[in-house]
Image (cartoon, grey):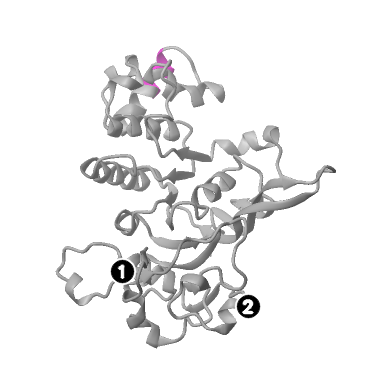
Amino acid sequence: MTAPLLEVEGLKKYFPVRRTILGRVTQEIRAVDGVSFTIAAGETLGLVGESGCGKSTVGKLALRLIPPSAGRIRLEGEPIEALRPRAMRAYRRRLQIVFQDPFASLNPRLRVGAIVAEPLLNYGARKGAALEAEVAGLLAKVGLEEGAMRRFPHEFSGGQRQRIGIARALALKPRLIVCDEPVSALDVSVQAQVVNLLRDLQREFGLSYLFIAHDLAVVEHMSHRVAVMYLGRIVEQASRQSLFASPRHPYTKALLSAVPRIDGDDARRTRIRLLGEVPSALNPPSGCHFHPRCPWAEARCRSEDPRLREISPGHHVACHLAEDQSLAATASTSTSQPGAASA
């Protein structure tokens, strides 16, 4: 077995929001609270969950764009969590990102050629005709003509701008690209084009992706494995086939029950509606963070924090009741509560 390309272990990120006069932290947001996962070479790990659960923060931590409060990050076996920016520079070539908003992630004052060439220039690439040819080749890889180099970002559509962002991410031939909701701001037809482009590039260059999204249909199409986050923690992690065919955490079940289907299965599925709102990361619930909204919560769920454990080969769940097969059936009370909030 080869070592994973990226290893994340016990990763935490707490943001202080209140301090005493002497500077002691008295209140903090637990944006990421003990996240662990691995990504193999050539693999895509989909990271899903509701808005505000900490997905994007995990991506920034994995890239060392922000320092972690605790935990370990290893890139090809080398620890990088404590590196200072100067020492981290050597690793930047292997780690890149595609941002969520293609309208805000490109410098409007630069032409596309300069935007794509910037990473190459930062790492001492050739200049002149050789650099121009390399940029033209990168644009061709993402389906844009050479003439795009001389135009500004505002002259392109959203899908074309995202292709420019992908070309920029490819410039340094990275090993891992963090895709931070790369299609959420695009039309559905354009989403499919960008997702298919990412898959084609993965096969061609052997790329690994941390694919952050809240659209489960896109994640199912894109990912090899899927991790589900809730309030700063991973509550379920499994292969794509296992998670979508047999979800074991109540939160995952609720998310999947809300995904529209066109295969005629909707009539036989029961929609799980969750009570209440997502708790605040300033004051997360004791025990299992999901217990205030869980239709099956028991007394120990309110006091005992479930650890992420393997319940079948490759399938990890943080739930005290994960082995209870009766949870596969939807609780009748979960769809009849007034004022229930859907996942």
In magenta segment, residue 133: yes
Residue position marked by numbered label 2 in the rendering: 303
Can you tell which quarter of the image residue 242 is in?
bottom left
100 lies above or below 275: above
Residue 341 to residue 267: above or below? above
The mark found on residue 257 in the picture is: 1
Type of secondary structure dominating the magenta stretch:
helix
Q: Which residues are magenta?
A: 129-134
Q: Amino acid at mark 2?
A: Ser
Sequence order check: which comes first, mark 1 or mark 2? 1
| Secondary element type, mark 1 | helix
- Say above or below: 23 vs 161: below
Type of amino acid under label 1: Ser
Q: Which mark is residue 223?
A: none
Check disc 2: other Cα within 10 Å, few if <14, some if 14-19, many if 20+: some
Residue 300 as seen in the image, left or right of residue 322:
right
Q: Secondary structure at mark 2?
A: loop
Identity of the residue furthest to the top in this view: 128
